[in-house]
Amino acid sequence: MSNKMLKINEYMNIGEAAKFLGVCIATLRNWDRKGKFKARRNPINNYRYYSKKDLLKILNKIESGEALCAKTGKKEQDNE
């Protein structure tokens, strides 16, 4: 049972994930729908959950300037 509790602690719901990344919930829903940043789903209620490990990878990309475009979910490129 403690293994399941550990796994639960490794995930954030969509609201927590949005706040963690500094984006709105709709952005995460769009990225999931377009397959750019897939969420895992709760088998009972179908809610989206995001791995903290995956969120940290995305946050590092955002902070390093490899931000994802809110519309496409793809890497934004400088036009300079």
Image (tube, rainbow, N blue to C red):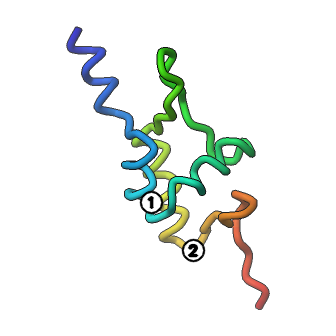
Q: Secondary structure at mark 1?
A: helix
Q: Amino acid at mark 1?
A: Leu
Please, is residue 9 above or below residue 54 in the view?
Answer: above
**Residue 57 location, x and y as percent?**
50, 52
Estimate the x, y position of residue 43 in percent, counting from the top left.
51, 16
Q: Residues within 10 Å of mark 1 (few under 14, many from 20)?
A: some
Residue at which label 2 appears: 65
Kindly indicate the quadrant of the structure image that contains residue 67: bottom right
Q: Secondary structure under badge 2?
A: loop
Between marks 1 and 2, how big is the CA–CA gap?
A: 14 Å
**Residue sitting at the far top:** 1
The single residue placed furthest to the right in the displayed view is 79
The reply to whether dot 1 and dot 2 touch (C-beta < 8 Å) is no
Q: Quadrant of residue 74?
A: bottom right
Residue 30 position, x and y percent, is 67, 50
Q: Which residue is mark 1?
A: 21
Q: Is residue 4 left or right of residue 20?
A: left
Q: What residue appears at the point 30 percent right and 15 percent down from the top-left corner? A: 4
Image height of 45 relative to 14, above or below: above
Of marks 1 and 2, the one in the foreground = 1
Q: Answer left or right for 45 relative to 6.
A: right
Sequence-earlier tag: 1 or 2: 1
**Residue type pointed to by label 2:** Gly
